[in-house]
Image (cartoon, grey):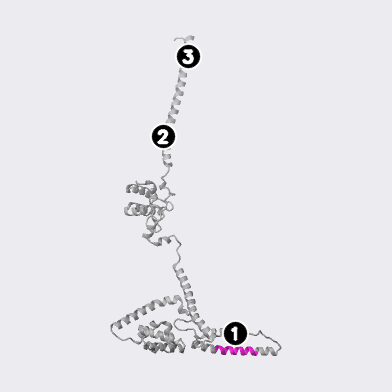
Amino acid sequence: MFRSTPHGSSGSGKMNSTSFLLLRIWTLVYVLLTVFGTLSSTAVHAEPSTTTSSAEQEEVPAYMREDADWGTYYDPQKEFCGDKDCYKILGFDYEMFGKSPPDKKEITKRYRALSRAWHPDKSKKKGAKERFVKINKAYEILTDKEKRDEYDYLRERPDEYFTKYGSSVLWSYAPKSDARFISILFLIFGSVFTYYAQLSKWQQIADRLTKAAVEGLSLRDGGTVESVDIRERALEILAQTEEKEKEDAAAAKANGAKKKGPKLTGKEKKLKHQESLRPIVAQLVKEEHKDFGGGFHQPTYRDLLVIKLVKMPFAIVKFILWRTKYAIRRLRGLELNEEERMVLTKTAIGEIGWAAAEKDGELEDLLAAEVWIMENLEKWKDFQEMKTMSKGDQKRIARWKKRQGSKLE
Protein backbone atom coordinates (compact mmCIF):
# COMPACT_ATOMS: atom_id res chain seq x y z
CA MET A 1 0.00 0.00 0.00
CA PHE A 2 1.34 3.29 -0.99
CA ARG A 3 0.83 6.65 0.61
CA SER A 4 0.07 9.63 -1.17
CA THR A 5 2.35 12.47 -0.74
CA PRO A 6 1.16 16.01 -0.24
CA HIS A 7 2.54 16.93 -3.60
CA GLY A 8 0.60 14.11 -5.26
CA SER A 9 -2.59 15.14 -3.54
CA SER A 10 -2.27 18.66 -4.81
CA GLY A 11 -1.84 17.54 -8.42
CA SER A 12 -4.84 15.24 -8.25
CA GLY A 13 -7.08 18.08 -6.93
CA LYS A 14 -6.11 20.31 -9.80
CA MET A 15 -7.02 17.65 -12.33
CA ASN A 16 -10.41 17.09 -10.72
CA SER A 17 -11.14 20.82 -10.84
CA THR A 18 -10.22 21.02 -14.49
CA SER A 19 -12.37 18.04 -15.38
CA PHE A 20 -15.28 19.46 -13.50
CA LEU A 21 -14.92 22.79 -15.33
CA LEU A 22 -14.76 21.06 -18.69
CA LEU A 23 -17.80 19.05 -17.78
CA ARG A 24 -19.71 22.19 -16.90
CA ILE A 25 -18.70 23.87 -20.17
CA TRP A 26 -19.68 20.79 -22.16
CA THR A 27 -23.01 20.63 -20.38
CA LEU A 28 -23.68 24.30 -21.13
CA VAL A 29 -22.79 23.83 -24.80
CA TYR A 30 -25.05 20.78 -24.98
CA VAL A 31 -27.93 22.71 -23.45
CA LEU A 32 -27.41 25.61 -25.86
CA LEU A 33 -27.23 23.25 -28.81
CA THR A 34 -30.36 21.49 -27.65
CA VAL A 35 -32.25 24.75 -27.23
CA PHE A 36 -31.06 26.03 -30.59
CA GLY A 37 -32.01 22.79 -32.26
CA THR A 38 -35.47 22.90 -30.72
CA LEU A 39 -36.04 26.48 -31.89
CA SER A 40 -34.81 25.64 -35.37
CA SER A 41 -37.07 22.62 -35.54
CA THR A 42 -40.02 24.69 -34.34
CA ALA A 43 -39.30 27.35 -36.94
CA VAL A 44 -39.00 24.75 -39.68
CA HIS A 45 -42.22 23.03 -38.68
CA ALA A 46 -44.03 26.34 -38.20
CA GLU A 47 -43.08 27.66 -41.65
CA PRO A 48 -45.63 25.51 -43.62
CA SER A 49 -48.34 26.48 -41.15
CA THR A 50 -47.56 30.13 -41.65
CA THR A 51 -47.59 29.65 -45.39
CA THR A 52 -50.94 27.86 -45.23
CA SER A 53 -52.43 30.62 -43.13
CA SER A 54 -51.24 33.19 -45.63
CA ALA A 55 -52.75 31.14 -48.44
CA GLU A 56 -56.01 31.00 -46.61
CA GLN A 57 -55.90 34.71 -46.07
CA GLU A 58 -54.87 35.40 -49.66
CA GLU A 59 -57.36 37.80 -51.32
CA VAL A 60 -60.16 36.12 -53.32
CA PRO A 61 -60.41 37.29 -56.98
CA ALA A 62 -62.75 40.25 -57.33
CA TYR A 63 -65.09 38.46 -59.73
CA MET A 64 -65.56 35.62 -57.19
CA ARG A 65 -66.73 37.89 -54.41
CA GLU A 66 -70.32 38.22 -53.38
CA ASP A 67 -70.17 41.99 -53.91
CA ALA A 68 -68.52 41.75 -57.34
CA ASP A 69 -69.25 44.63 -59.70
CA TRP A 70 -71.27 43.29 -62.64
CA GLY A 71 -71.49 46.63 -64.42
CA THR A 72 -74.49 47.81 -66.46
CA TYR A 73 -75.92 47.22 -69.94
CA TYR A 74 -78.98 48.52 -71.83
CA ASP A 75 -81.13 45.37 -72.15
CA PRO A 76 -84.65 46.10 -70.83
CA GLN A 77 -86.11 43.19 -72.80
CA LYS A 78 -83.63 40.78 -71.12
CA GLU A 79 -82.48 39.35 -74.44
CA PHE A 80 -78.97 38.94 -73.00
CA CYS A 81 -78.03 39.41 -69.32
CA GLY A 82 -80.61 42.05 -68.46
CA ASP A 83 -79.20 45.23 -66.95
CA LYS A 84 -75.88 43.50 -66.05
CA ASP A 85 -72.74 43.20 -68.21
CA CYS A 86 -72.21 39.58 -69.37
CA TYR A 87 -68.44 40.11 -69.46
CA LYS A 88 -68.20 41.46 -65.91
CA ILE A 89 -70.36 38.64 -64.59
CA LEU A 90 -67.58 36.23 -65.65
CA GLY A 91 -64.82 38.55 -64.44
CA PHE A 92 -63.79 40.20 -67.72
CA ASP A 93 -63.68 43.89 -68.56
CA TYR A 94 -64.80 44.73 -72.10
CA GLU A 95 -63.09 48.12 -71.96
CA MET A 96 -59.75 46.67 -70.87
CA PHE A 97 -59.03 43.60 -73.02
CA GLY A 98 -59.08 45.66 -76.23
CA LYS A 99 -58.06 43.59 -79.26
CA SER A 100 -57.35 40.50 -77.15
CA PRO A 101 -60.78 39.36 -76.01
CA PRO A 102 -61.06 36.19 -73.93
CA ASP A 103 -61.44 33.02 -75.97
CA LYS A 104 -63.87 30.21 -75.29
CA LYS A 105 -61.30 28.35 -73.17
CA GLU A 106 -60.78 31.31 -70.82
CA ILE A 107 -64.51 31.92 -70.59
CA THR A 108 -65.16 28.26 -69.76
CA LYS A 109 -62.45 28.34 -67.08
CA ARG A 110 -64.01 31.36 -65.38
CA TYR A 111 -67.47 29.86 -65.72
CA ARG A 112 -66.43 26.62 -64.01
CA ALA A 113 -64.77 28.49 -61.16
CA LEU A 114 -67.85 30.61 -60.58
CA SER A 115 -70.14 27.59 -60.93
CA ARG A 116 -68.28 25.73 -58.19
CA ALA A 117 -68.61 28.76 -55.93
CA TRP A 118 -72.24 29.64 -56.62
CA HIS A 119 -73.98 26.44 -57.66
CA PRO A 120 -77.18 26.15 -55.55
CA ASP A 121 -76.27 22.58 -54.56
CA LYS A 122 -72.88 23.69 -53.22
CA SER A 123 -73.46 27.21 -51.92
CA LYS A 124 -75.93 27.99 -49.16
CA LYS A 125 -75.44 31.72 -49.44
CA LYS A 126 -78.46 33.91 -49.95
CA GLY A 127 -79.13 34.64 -53.61
CA ALA A 128 -76.87 31.84 -54.84
CA LYS A 129 -79.52 30.49 -57.21
CA GLU A 130 -80.15 33.89 -58.82
CA ARG A 131 -76.42 34.52 -59.24
CA PHE A 132 -75.91 31.09 -60.78
CA VAL A 133 -78.70 31.76 -63.30
CA LYS A 134 -77.00 35.03 -64.30
CA ILE A 135 -73.60 33.31 -64.55
CA ASN A 136 -75.06 30.55 -66.71
CA LYS A 137 -76.78 33.11 -68.98
CA ALA A 138 -73.54 35.08 -69.40
CA TYR A 139 -71.71 31.87 -70.35
CA GLU A 140 -74.36 31.03 -72.97
CA ILE A 141 -74.13 34.50 -74.53
CA LEU A 142 -70.33 34.73 -74.63
CA THR A 143 -69.77 31.20 -75.96
CA ASP A 144 -72.29 31.63 -78.79
CA LYS A 145 -70.46 33.54 -81.54
CA GLU A 146 -73.59 34.98 -83.16
CA LYS A 147 -75.09 36.18 -79.88
CA ARG A 148 -71.75 37.50 -78.65
CA ASP A 149 -71.18 39.51 -81.85
CA GLU A 150 -74.65 41.00 -81.56
CA TYR A 151 -74.08 41.73 -77.87
CA ASP A 152 -70.84 43.58 -78.63
CA TYR A 153 -72.43 45.47 -81.54
CA LEU A 154 -75.44 46.70 -79.56
CA ARG A 155 -73.36 47.78 -76.57
CA GLU A 156 -73.04 51.35 -77.84
CA ARG A 157 -76.13 51.33 -80.09
CA PRO A 158 -79.31 51.48 -77.94
CA ASP A 159 -81.20 53.02 -80.86
CA GLU A 160 -80.69 49.86 -82.93
CA TYR A 161 -81.64 47.73 -79.93
CA PHE A 162 -84.88 49.77 -79.80
CA THR A 163 -85.52 49.20 -83.51
CA LYS A 164 -84.98 45.44 -83.34
CA TYR A 165 -86.75 44.57 -80.11
CA GLY A 166 -89.66 47.00 -80.31
CA SER A 167 -91.01 50.09 -78.56
CA SER A 168 -92.15 48.19 -75.49
CA VAL A 169 -88.63 48.51 -74.15
CA LEU A 170 -89.44 52.13 -73.29
CA TRP A 171 -91.95 50.98 -70.71
CA SER A 172 -90.32 47.86 -69.35
CA TYR A 173 -89.35 49.56 -66.09
CA ALA A 174 -92.55 51.53 -65.67
CA PRO A 175 -95.05 50.38 -63.06
CA LYS A 176 -97.73 48.23 -64.63
CA SER A 177 -101.28 49.58 -64.48
CA ASP A 178 -104.31 47.40 -64.03
CA ALA A 179 -105.85 47.03 -67.49
CA ARG A 180 -109.27 46.47 -65.99
CA PHE A 181 -109.11 49.75 -64.08
CA ILE A 182 -108.00 51.65 -67.18
CA SER A 183 -110.78 50.06 -69.27
CA ILE A 184 -113.46 50.89 -66.70
CA LEU A 185 -112.17 54.46 -66.40
CA PHE A 186 -112.22 54.83 -70.19
CA LEU A 187 -115.79 53.54 -70.42
CA ILE A 188 -116.96 55.89 -67.65
CA PHE A 189 -115.42 59.02 -69.18
CA GLY A 190 -116.44 57.94 -72.68
CA SER A 191 -120.04 57.40 -71.60
CA VAL A 192 -120.18 60.78 -69.83
CA PHE A 193 -118.75 62.47 -72.93
CA THR A 194 -121.20 60.82 -75.35
CA TYR A 195 -124.12 61.67 -73.04
CA TYR A 196 -123.31 65.39 -72.95
CA ALA A 197 -122.39 65.42 -76.65
CA GLN A 198 -125.88 64.13 -77.47
CA LEU A 199 -127.42 66.66 -75.07
CA SER A 200 -125.54 69.48 -76.81
CA LYS A 201 -126.68 68.18 -80.18
CA TRP A 202 -130.34 68.26 -79.09
CA GLN A 203 -129.91 71.61 -77.35
CA GLN A 204 -128.79 73.31 -80.57
CA ILE A 205 -132.10 72.52 -82.30
CA ALA A 206 -134.07 73.27 -79.13
CA ASP A 207 -132.45 76.72 -78.88
CA ARG A 208 -133.35 77.52 -82.49
CA LEU A 209 -136.93 76.45 -81.96
CA THR A 210 -137.13 78.46 -78.72
CA LYS A 211 -135.72 81.56 -80.40
CA ALA A 212 -138.19 81.31 -83.31
CA ALA A 213 -141.11 80.89 -80.91
CA VAL A 214 -140.06 83.72 -78.58
CA GLU A 215 -139.43 86.19 -81.42
CA GLY A 216 -142.64 85.15 -83.19
CA LEU A 217 -141.04 84.27 -86.53
CA SER A 218 -143.53 83.33 -89.23
CA LEU A 219 -143.06 80.50 -91.70
CA ARG A 220 -141.81 82.99 -94.29
CA ASP A 221 -139.30 84.51 -91.85
CA GLY A 222 -137.68 81.23 -90.81
CA GLY A 223 -140.20 79.92 -88.33
CA THR A 224 -141.68 76.43 -88.37
CA VAL A 225 -145.04 74.89 -87.70
CA GLU A 226 -143.70 73.72 -84.34
CA SER A 227 -142.41 77.18 -83.34
CA VAL A 228 -145.74 78.82 -84.24
CA ASP A 229 -147.71 76.21 -82.29
CA ILE A 230 -145.46 76.49 -79.24
CA ARG A 231 -145.67 80.30 -79.29
CA GLU A 232 -149.47 80.25 -79.32
CA ARG A 233 -149.64 77.93 -76.32
CA ALA A 234 -146.91 79.84 -74.50
CA LEU A 235 -148.87 83.09 -75.00
CA GLU A 236 -151.94 81.49 -73.49
CA ILE A 237 -149.98 80.38 -70.43
CA LEU A 238 -148.36 83.82 -70.13
CA ALA A 239 -151.75 85.52 -70.39
CA GLN A 240 -153.08 83.39 -67.56
CA THR A 241 -150.03 84.22 -65.46
CA GLU A 242 -150.33 87.95 -66.13
CA GLU A 243 -154.05 87.85 -65.36
CA LYS A 244 -153.30 86.31 -62.01
CA GLU A 245 -150.64 88.93 -61.34
CA LYS A 246 -153.15 91.68 -62.14
CA GLU A 247 -155.65 90.18 -59.72
CA ASP A 248 -152.98 90.06 -57.02
CA ALA A 249 -152.00 93.65 -57.78
CA ALA A 250 -155.65 94.77 -57.60
CA ALA A 251 -156.06 93.03 -54.26
CA ALA A 252 -152.91 94.69 -52.97
CA LYS A 253 -154.15 98.08 -54.18
CA ALA A 254 -157.48 97.56 -52.41
CA ASN A 255 -155.58 96.94 -49.22
CA GLY A 256 -153.90 100.28 -49.55
CA ALA A 257 -150.58 99.15 -51.01
CA LYS A 258 -149.46 101.30 -53.89
CA LYS A 259 -146.80 100.04 -56.23
CA LYS A 260 -145.94 101.92 -59.35
CA GLY A 261 -143.03 100.90 -61.51
CA PRO A 262 -141.05 102.99 -63.99
CA LYS A 263 -142.67 103.77 -67.31
CA LEU A 264 -141.30 101.54 -70.11
CA THR A 265 -140.83 102.34 -73.78
CA GLY A 266 -142.34 100.17 -76.52
CA LYS A 267 -139.02 98.39 -77.16
CA GLU A 268 -138.49 97.73 -73.46
CA LYS A 269 -142.00 96.33 -73.17
CA LYS A 270 -141.33 94.00 -76.09
CA LEU A 271 -138.07 92.76 -74.57
CA LYS A 272 -139.74 92.27 -71.21
CA HIS A 273 -142.55 90.35 -72.88
CA GLN A 274 -140.06 88.08 -74.66
CA GLU A 275 -138.08 87.44 -71.47
CA SER A 276 -141.32 86.48 -69.71
CA LEU A 277 -142.22 84.19 -72.60
CA ARG A 278 -138.79 82.50 -72.93
CA PRO A 279 -138.88 80.15 -69.87
CA ILE A 280 -142.41 79.03 -70.79
CA VAL A 281 -141.34 78.23 -74.37
CA ALA A 282 -138.16 76.46 -73.21
CA GLN A 283 -140.19 74.27 -70.86
CA LEU A 284 -142.69 73.36 -73.60
CA VAL A 285 -139.86 72.48 -76.00
CA LYS A 286 -138.19 70.30 -73.39
CA GLU A 287 -141.40 68.43 -72.56
CA GLU A 288 -142.89 68.01 -76.03
CA HIS A 289 -139.91 67.80 -78.37
CA LYS A 290 -137.65 65.17 -76.87
CA ASP A 291 -136.80 63.93 -80.36
CA PHE A 292 -136.44 66.22 -83.39
CA GLY A 293 -135.51 63.28 -85.62
CA GLY A 294 -132.30 62.66 -87.50
CA GLY A 295 -130.46 61.82 -84.29
CA PHE A 296 -131.29 65.14 -82.60
CA HIS A 297 -132.95 63.74 -79.49
CA GLN A 298 -132.51 64.10 -75.78
CA PRO A 299 -129.84 61.69 -74.48
CA THR A 300 -130.89 58.28 -73.19
CA TYR A 301 -129.00 55.23 -71.99
CA ARG A 302 -128.72 54.11 -75.63
CA ASP A 303 -126.37 57.03 -76.29
CA LEU A 304 -123.82 55.90 -73.70
CA LEU A 305 -120.51 54.68 -75.10
CA VAL A 306 -120.67 51.37 -73.25
CA ILE A 307 -124.08 50.58 -74.81
CA LYS A 308 -122.87 51.58 -78.27
CA LEU A 309 -119.84 49.30 -77.93
CA VAL A 310 -122.07 46.40 -76.92
CA LYS A 311 -124.40 46.97 -79.88
CA MET A 312 -121.63 47.61 -82.40
CA PRO A 313 -120.80 43.95 -83.24
CA PHE A 314 -124.47 43.20 -83.89
CA ALA A 315 -124.79 46.29 -86.10
CA ILE A 316 -121.70 45.30 -88.10
CA VAL A 317 -122.96 41.75 -88.62
CA LYS A 318 -126.37 43.05 -89.62
CA PHE A 319 -124.82 45.48 -92.13
CA ILE A 320 -122.63 42.76 -93.68
CA LEU A 321 -125.57 40.38 -94.02
CA TRP A 322 -127.73 43.07 -95.62
CA ARG A 323 -125.00 44.05 -98.08
CA THR A 324 -124.41 40.40 -98.97
CA LYS A 325 -128.11 39.82 -99.55
CA TYR A 326 -128.34 43.03 -101.61
CA ALA A 327 -125.39 42.00 -103.81
CA ILE A 328 -126.87 38.54 -104.42
CA ARG A 329 -130.21 40.05 -105.46
CA ARG A 330 -128.47 42.42 -107.87
CA LEU A 331 -126.52 39.53 -109.41
CA ARG A 332 -129.78 37.67 -109.90
CA GLY A 333 -131.28 40.71 -111.63
CA LEU A 334 -134.17 41.10 -109.17
CA GLU A 335 -135.95 44.42 -108.66
CA LEU A 336 -135.48 46.46 -105.50
CA ASN A 337 -137.84 45.43 -102.73
CA GLU A 338 -139.45 47.81 -100.23
CA GLU A 339 -136.72 47.37 -97.62
CA GLU A 340 -133.93 48.05 -100.10
CA ARG A 341 -135.65 51.17 -101.43
CA MET A 342 -136.02 52.53 -97.90
CA VAL A 343 -132.40 51.83 -96.98
CA LEU A 344 -131.05 53.36 -100.19
CA THR A 345 -133.27 56.43 -99.80
CA LYS A 346 -132.27 56.93 -96.17
CA THR A 347 -128.61 56.58 -97.09
CA ALA A 348 -128.96 59.14 -99.91
CA ILE A 349 -130.74 61.95 -98.02
CA GLY A 350 -129.39 61.29 -94.52
CA GLU A 351 -131.04 60.85 -91.14
CA ILE A 352 -132.31 64.44 -90.91
CA GLY A 353 -133.93 64.47 -94.34
CA TRP A 354 -135.53 61.09 -93.68
CA ALA A 355 -136.91 62.25 -90.32
CA ALA A 356 -138.33 65.44 -91.86
CA ALA A 357 -140.01 63.52 -94.68
CA GLU A 358 -141.43 61.01 -92.22
CA LYS A 359 -142.78 63.81 -90.05
CA ASP A 360 -144.37 65.64 -93.01
CA GLY A 361 -145.88 62.44 -94.42
CA GLU A 362 -143.78 62.60 -97.60
CA LEU A 363 -142.10 59.20 -97.40
CA GLU A 364 -144.17 57.65 -100.18
CA ASP A 365 -143.40 60.53 -102.55
CA LEU A 366 -139.75 60.36 -101.54
CA LEU A 367 -139.51 56.63 -102.25
CA ALA A 368 -141.24 57.12 -105.60
CA ALA A 369 -138.71 59.83 -106.54
CA GLU A 370 -135.85 57.27 -106.42
CA VAL A 371 -133.42 59.75 -104.86
CA TRP A 372 -130.66 57.10 -104.68
CA ILE A 373 -130.11 58.01 -108.32
CA MET A 374 -127.82 61.07 -108.44
CA GLU A 375 -129.92 63.07 -110.94
CA ASN A 376 -133.09 62.59 -108.92
CA LEU A 377 -131.23 63.45 -105.71
CA GLU A 378 -130.13 66.81 -107.14
CA LYS A 379 -133.73 67.64 -108.09
CA TRP A 380 -134.92 66.71 -104.61
CA LYS A 381 -132.30 68.97 -102.99
CA ASP A 382 -133.35 71.88 -105.21
CA PHE A 383 -136.97 71.32 -104.28
CA GLN A 384 -136.16 71.25 -100.55
CA GLU A 385 -134.20 74.48 -100.88
CA MET A 386 -137.11 76.21 -102.63
CA LYS A 387 -139.49 75.18 -99.86
CA THR A 388 -137.61 77.47 -97.49
CA MET A 389 -137.94 80.46 -99.82
CA SER A 390 -140.76 82.95 -100.04
CA LYS A 391 -143.44 82.46 -102.68
CA GLY A 392 -142.07 85.36 -104.68
CA ASP A 393 -138.59 83.81 -104.81
CA GLN A 394 -140.10 80.46 -105.77
CA LYS A 395 -141.97 82.03 -108.70
CA ARG A 396 -138.86 83.83 -109.93
CA ILE A 397 -136.76 80.65 -109.82
CA ALA A 398 -139.54 78.68 -111.55
CA ARG A 399 -139.69 81.23 -114.36
CA TRP A 400 -135.91 81.18 -114.73
CA LYS A 401 -135.83 77.39 -114.95
CA LYS A 402 -138.64 77.43 -117.46
CA ARG A 403 -136.65 79.77 -119.64
CA GLN A 404 -133.66 77.45 -119.30
CA GLY A 405 -135.74 74.55 -120.55
CA SER A 406 -136.10 72.70 -117.24
CA LYS A 407 -139.21 72.20 -115.20
CA LEU A 408 -139.44 71.62 -111.45
CA GLU A 409 -141.17 68.37 -110.77
Q: Which badge, 1 or 2, is on the more N-terminal residue?
A: 2
Return the residue at label 3.
Answer: 14
Return the residue at label 1.
Answer: 267
In the visual, does 97 lie left or right of 296? Answer: left
- Name which residue type carries label 1: Lys
> In which quadrant of the rendered view does residue 315 lie?
bottom left
Residue depicted at x 41% and y 78%: 311
Q: In which quarter of the image is the N terminus?
A: top left
**Viewer-side label of 1, 2:** 1
Locate residue 50, reporting x and y percent.
43, 37
Q: Distance between the residues labelled 1 and 3?
A: 168 Å
Is disc 2 placed on a helix, strand or loop? helix
Is disc 3 placed on a helix, strand or loop? helix
In the visual, does 259 lie left or right of 343? Answer: right
Give the answer, above or below, for where 38 lies relative to 246: above
Asked if one can make out residue 378 in the rendered structure from this viewpoint, the answer is yes
Locate residue 180, reporting x and y percent.
44, 69
Specify whether residue 117 is painted magenta.
no
Locate residue 224, reporting x and y percent.
49, 87
Q: Which badge, 1 or 3, is on the more N-terminal residue?
A: 3
Q: In which quarter of the image is the C terminus?
A: bottom left
Residue contact between numbered discs 1 and 3, judged by CB atoms under 8 Å: no
Pointer 2 local density, CA inside 10 Å: few below 14, some 14–19, many at least 20: few
Specify whether residue 235 is painted magenta.
yes
Task: Identify the disc placed on residue 45.
Answer: 2
Asked if one can make out residue 91 in the rendered structure from this viewpoint, the answer is no
Task: Identify the disc placed on residue 313.
Answer: none
Pointer 1 local density, CA inside 10 Å: few below 14, some 14–19, many at least 20: few
> In which quadrant of the rendered view does residue 250 lie?
bottom right
- The part of the chain drawn in magenta is 233-247
> In which quadrant of the rendered view does residue 239 lie?
bottom right
